[in-house]
Amino acid sequence: QSRNFMDEGLNDHHRGLRMRGRPKILLARNYEEAVHLFDKYQNNLLGVISDVSYLKDGEKVVDAGLELARYIKTKDKYMPFLLQSSDSKWGAVAKALKVSFVSKNDPLLLRSLSDFITTYMAFGDFIFIDPSTHLEVARIKTLKELQQKIYSIPDESLFYHFSRDHVSKWLKARALFSLAKSIKNLRVASLDDIQHTKVAVCEFINSFRSMKGRGVIAKFYREDFDEYASFARIGNGSIGGKARGLAFLNTIINKYYLSEPVADVVLAVPRSVVLSTEVFDEFMNANNLHAFTSAQLSDDEVLKVFVEAELPVYVQEDVLKFCSVLKKPIAIRSSSVLEDSRYQPFAGIYATYMISPSPSLHQTHHQICTAIKCVYASAFYRASKRYAAVIRSVIDEERMGVVLQELVGQAHGDVFYPTFSGVARSVNFYPIGDEKAEEGVVSVAMGLGKHIVEGGASLRFSPVYPKKILQLSSVDLTLKDTQKTFYALDLQPSAFIPSLDDAINFKKMPIKDAEDHGTLRWLGSVYDYRNQIIRDNLLNDGLRLVTFSNILKYDVFPLAPLMRKILAAGQREMNQAIELEFAVDLQVGEGKLPVLYLLQIRPIVENKECVFDDCWAVDKEKLLVYSNSALGNGLVTDVCDVIYIKTKDFSPQYNALIVPIIDTLNKKLEDEQKGYVLIGPGRWGSQDPWLGIPIKWGAISAARLIVETGLDNYRIEPSQGTHFFHNLTSLNVGYFTINPAFETDVLNLSFLDKLPAVYEDEYLRHVRFDKPCIIKMDGKNGNGMVELPDET
């Protein structure tokens, strides 16, 4: 019995715990002990087996067992009771008392005992019978089967068993005590109660199966996997950094009771299955791929080799089972051993693909398996190798896990996306006004989170002051700096093909489409042309804007208080500053609560605080750069090179053309093991070329300091909360923001213009000092400077 119900455990640990809940035997040596044990454990007893003759009041009484049966039946008339005796005459008496009887002289005594325990103490399958014929009408082996079959079982049979507490007893025998108690408390007095009972039982089982998987990394059992499994693993190796973060989030949700609705919001982690690093090792070895990773192949060639390789057969079969229960698209995300670690985050270096379910199960299966191999391949692209070299890691030692995670959101025609996505940090490197660094910062955008992590226009706010938003402080800023487009997943299966671009099947859509989908009503405002004001609704004609006013001003969804609570819990549990990625689904249907899904957590890597006595009392004529908005800590004394974008006749229309030039210069300096200072207008790393240089981290990996500057006619809100920025902070690469409106800020480009160029074209210059400049960063106070070399 114990071994049978143990199979419902999610992993070896859970199975061991279930074994501890197996039924126990209590032995009474006389009548008084028997009554005492029954009174004490009545609500937990599965049944009673009694001799007929034993001691009562210190003397042997020939029918003490009959008296015990009468006593127990007055307390609980449906309690299973078995009398056993060497004298068969007691059989007729037992029958009159409506209890079972077995003769000790019966050669089939043990079989009779076994049948009694299996049938009446609910140790076997639950057999629903027709009460009039006592014939079997249904047989239930598992909790899952009970949920599936309860509506097909005749009402008369259900009434017979529920009115006698047979079902709750069957659940107790399987150590499902909380569920057994809930079902026992159902009052089934007549056949009229049965419909209500069916609904209630299904709701109880649904809640129990959903709750059971929270905070647990279950082992993937192909035969038992279903839609209630929230977090499972395939393989026995490490699950990698990203998956560890998901498991950590699951634990936090459970520990702080956040899985229960908080302010009418459900907090959850999307259903996920993790392929451990053991699968990666098997895949690499079976296909002899290590030889290709060390060869000087292009990224396209690496991808082709990996896609043509075969995943282990058992992995393909497990993924097929996972596909069979899919209801939404799936994100295939990297989860390497080094990723999201405390010291070497690898944030955003590897690929993430998204696959939409196809009407053909086998097509969906094929595309997911292909995407898994694409993620594996991304570990060996040139950008990944270059990043590894910067942090002095050997890419051949990298071992990749993969997370298959259900996508958050709803389908709208041929696209799919969440209501909005966001990135939250427990430390704010750009506090404005009353904001404090330790209060954190949140960036949100409509649609998929790619819009934020790639540096697109998003809405930035402090969770402590959600109504004070710089981007919305004037009509002009709102029109200029709010989101104009959003990303959605193309649901056409043909949109996905193996590609170096992991956004191959994304659609970039205008905001007006979101209004047609019904998404914008929570997030949108209207610019009233006639009165030149912004109205926080969509009832008027005018330009549609993404302002999040209904959420941040009017608390339609309690985003700010939730972020404060989650960030505080995460930082407390991780014992350092953290970054969270999340998505919110508000279009959940009538009667359902909106859901905030936590997608990822990673530490913001701590750097040694750098404090310099009187370091800021420097003659500004000896400075190349001075910023009151500096990110990073420390002292850099070995940089002689500066690459800067020319500001004369600057136009953002050429930003995309600058990327390959910087990539070439960066590669040359990296080969020479030289760091440099990079200076340019707008957001570095933005994927919107009108907001800044749309460059990837691998193309500027040798930079020791990056300076973003505004121009009088080109002022962009500073970047925050992206993968790009996470790598900067993790590697202690300085990032200074120069605001032309601040008199204290300094950027001495005229000095650089006088130096001879190592390289120059119409867009940028590369110059070199004879001696190193000195870079100082005070992360505590947000100040940073670059002192010119001594010869100047």
Image: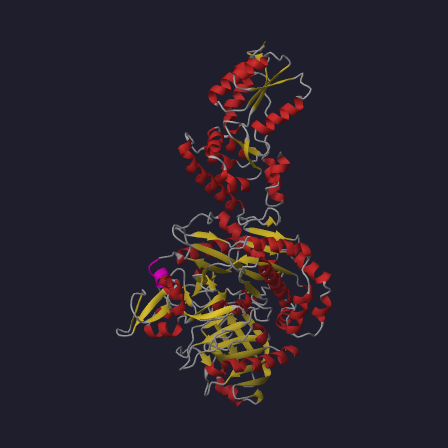
Up/down of 543 relative to 75, above or below: below
Position of 282 with respect to 326 (left or right) is right
Question: Looking at the picture, how far across and down is residue 573, in whole percent?
Answer: 52, 53
Is residue 606 visible in this depiction of the protein?
no
Q: Nearer the viewer, residue 687 or 490?
A: 490
Residue 316, given in percent of the width and then of the height, sits at 64, 57
Q: Is residue 552 magenta?
A: yes
90 in the magenta segment: no
Question: For this rendering, which residue is in front, 70 or 316?
Answer: 316
Question: Please, is residue 575 above or below residue 135 in the view?
Answer: below
Quadrant showing the N terminus: top right
Residue 284 percent coordinates (x, y): 70, 62
All told, the count of numbered labels is: 0
Q: Quadrant of the C terminus?
A: bottom right
At horizontal 50% and vertical 23% (from top left) the residue drawn is 39
Q: Quadrant of residue 116?
A: top right
Question: Measured from the top left, where is residue 196 in percent x and y?
Answer: 41, 38
Q: Which residues are magenta?
A: 548-555
- Return the residue nearer the eye: 539 or 115: 115
In terms of image quadrants, where is residue 742? bottom left
Q: Is residue 430 visible?
A: yes
431 to 754, vertically: above or below: above
Which residue occupies the extreme front position in the image? 133
Colouring: secondary structure
